[in-house]
Amino acid sequence: LSIKLYNNILVFASCHHLSPSPTALFPAASRMKRGGSVMSPMFHKSFQDVHLLFEIMLSGVHFQDSGGFFVEDAELASLHRARDLKFICEKIIPRKLAEILRLIHNLSNQMGPLHQDDFERTLFTLVYTAQQVVNSTSEHQRDMWKGSFVSLYKAVKQDLTGTY
């Protein structure tokens, strides 16, 4: 997934998705609490965040086998917003193939546009699946991850074009 395409999608999404999200698509988000209150972590809250995300992605990011999320540029990684991104990528987006398949199933049953936080998390999951395609060690694994990537891509495309 091209970083430029990702940047353009987030810019479009910021204008397109305005409602708060239910957490059904990303159950881990409903379990997140800070200071005793439930929070719905989201990276993208302004156009400045879009530019920062573009810079972070361009610098290089990796999902590690251990479950960690790593930003290559140490200066960018030290920013508060980068730590928010790390939190979302490590704790919210699905990382197991079965969880991603459940997300794809739920996305296929989604009526109407995705909420902004669900859209963003779907894109992060898409980036994760792209990395898994590249890192797969067997043809069977690669085919499974490719299928997941294509399905997530179609869900994002459907949401952006309004063809529900």
Image: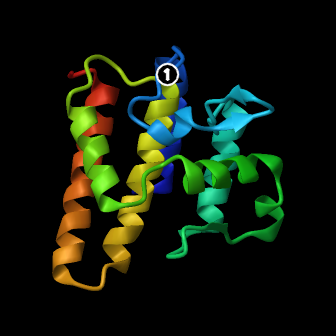
Q: Is residue 135 above or below residue 84?
A: below
Label 1: how many Cα within 10 Å (few below 14, some 14–19, many 20+): some
Return the residue at label 1: 21
Q: Nearer the viewer, residue 111 or 157?
A: 111
> Quarter of the image holding residue 123?
top left
With respect to residue 112, does 102 lie above or below?
below
Residue 46 vs residue 129: left or right? right
Residue type for callout 1: Ser
Q: Look at the image and tell me whether residue 153 can be seen.
A: no
Q: Residue at x 39, y 25 (%)?
A: 114
Give the x, y percent position of residue 25.
38, 34
Query: Horizontal and vertical percent for residue 112?
Result: 29, 16
The residue shown at (20%, 33%) is: 108
Q: Position of residue 43 (x, y in %)?
A: 64, 39
Determine whether, in the image, residue 34 is placed left or right of residue 11.
Answer: right
Residue found farthest to the front: 36
Q: Quadrant of the C terminus?
A: top left
Mark 1 lies on a secondary structure that is: loop
* Color encoding of the figure: rainbow
In the displayed image of the protein, which residue is found farthest to the bottom? Answer: 137
